[in-house]
Amino acid sequence: MSAPAADQSHARSQTLVSVRDLSVEFRAGENSHLAVRGIDFTIGKGETVALVGESGSGKSVSALSIMRLLPYPAARHPSGQIFFEGKDLLKVPGAVMRDIRGARISIIFQEPMTSLNPLHTIEQQVGEILRLHKGLSEQDAKARTLDLLRKVGIRDAEKRLGAYPHQLSGGQRQRVMIAMALANEPDLLIADEPTTALDVTIQAQILELLKRLQRELGMAMLLITHDLGIVRKMADRVYVMNAGTIVERGTVRQIFEAPQHAYTRHLLAAEPKGEPPAGNPHGPVVVETDNLKVWFPVKRGLLRRTVDHVRAVDGVTLKLRAGETIGVVGESGSGKTTLGLAILRLISSEGPVVYMGKRIDGLGAKQMRPLRQQMQIVFQDPYGSLSPRLSVSQIVEEGLLIQDPDLGFEQRRARVSQALAEVGIDPTAQDRYPHEFSGGQRQRSAIARAMVLEPHFVMLDEPTSALDMSVQAQIVDLLRDLQRKRDLSYLFISHDLRVVRALSNYVVVLRNGVVVEEGATAQIFDSPREPYTQALLAAALNLEVANEGVLAT
């Protein structure tokens, strides 16, 4: 296949990576699926190339092929070559590939919780890369690790060295992944949704960091994202993927100002729109808290005495009525998820938590079990929250088996099929396992698991963070429709302020566990009073400006 004209625009610069006629096929028994179909693309030294497309289009599979990280032999390449500085990476010996992987080509994975080792501290995981590829001593590796953690915006980096992944917020885990990827100053950085779990202010910082390091190191970047605002700000050239093929390619200006393919125009026009269902100010109160606190003890010394506390949530009062949505926003580590977990009684707290007029903060696990059907959660990390040993059908029906054991197999099957169809997953695929779905499809499965029990209250912890923009809009519409039909109450936690504005009636702004501002959505977005809220909105607006240019086309 001849190189397209768009690929000639950087011919004067030296090509770092050249992918030619690449196909990827997955086999399971006698069945096979062609996920990528004969694609071609190039990446020049110091250049940023973006692969965009909806979940399942083949973006991540193509990127993982470059590093030979696909699950071989279940995955194979019927055709294709991947040249890196003249070497075909699909044919080089494993030892050569190990030297290249992590040192010359590095990757930021989309799901940090499943990519980080839960048994090793942050210092051990970042330091291992430095010792392995650069031969640094323990002391030098620790100093370099501290420097990297500070560069990616982790507060109190010294205190985080001994932390384990589960002790960090989703955004903090993603920043650790970025630090690990940049540790050896690679020639090519593959960034697979690098800011998915980050709030807008840190997102802007990370993007600026990547751009600065790219300039300093002459590093090339393959950017995989569904956020077109990021593509417009970061990329030099864009490849648009759909159903395993590249349907359009060109410079950023060409793609955003004069898209030729109908699918590209569809992506550019997609964003969450509309307003939430009108709340009833006199409706019944579903959830209420009063001066809620979640303090984690800091223990030191041989006797592990408590010397201080981390005030994750420090005196939060809120009232959520039937059919309403409260949006909770703030930077990573501000206490958003901790607040939701305390309301659901998944972690201990101080202060009243009232559900449907009854205090539940003193109830034990056995007493809470009947209420679990009415109080559900959609977690931030869909891959980490779905059991890899169960099919999607088994995952979604698990709650039915516990809460409604009298249902027969056919009845459960019908309920599962209906729930999957509502969130946009073909019910005929329900016997597949989570690893056989894209990130967006996994998140929709997690939403189906919560909705199949027909709850009254749902905590939505970044439910759209793993979804491309067009699917984000569909999920927002779905959540609003379900809310209208069932009079659902949502506690909606998100760093994506566009989605918050489309779904929330009321917004609470958290910082370091404290409410700094709250009010009706229109008031918070149109006339914020606090400087912190203004900074959050300004950071979001910078990305929206890029998207407005997109929508204008």
Image: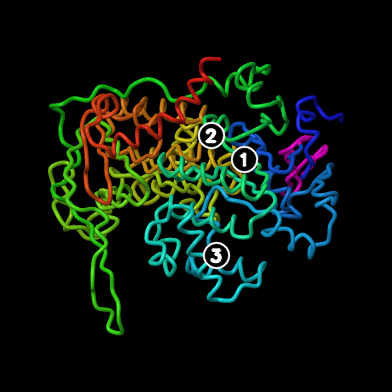
Q: Residue at x 45, y 61 (%)?
A: 165
SS of the residue at dot 1?
strand
Q: Residue drawn 76% across and 46% down?
A: 30
- Checking the image for residue 126, the label placed there is 3
Q: Residue at label 1?
A: 223
**41 w.r.t. 378: above or below:** above
Residue 552: x percent and y percent? 51, 15
Residue type at the position of mark 3: Val
* Residue at image point 68% right, 16% down: 260
For marks 2 and 1 on the same chain, the one whose residue lies earlier in the sequence: 1
Looking at the rendering, the stretch of residues picked out in magenta corresponds to: 17-41
User: Residues under labels 2 and 3: Cα distance?
Assistant: 26 Å
Residue in front for this viewpoint, 261 or 483: 261
Would residue 417 be found to the left or right of residue 89 on screen? left
Image position of 78 (left or right of 409): right
- Circle 2 residue: 230
Q: Are marks 2 and 1 in contact (CB under 8 Å)?
A: yes
Picture coordinates of residue 541, whole percent (x, y): 41, 29
Tag shown at residue 338: none
Can residue 242 be seen from the camera position used here? no
Badge 1 amino acid? Leu
Q: Residues within 10 Å of mark 3 (few under 14, many from 20)?
A: many
Q: Position of residue 60 (x, y in %)?
A: 64, 43
Nearer to us in this view, 358 or 46: 46
- Of the 4 image quadrants, the one containing the N terminus is top right
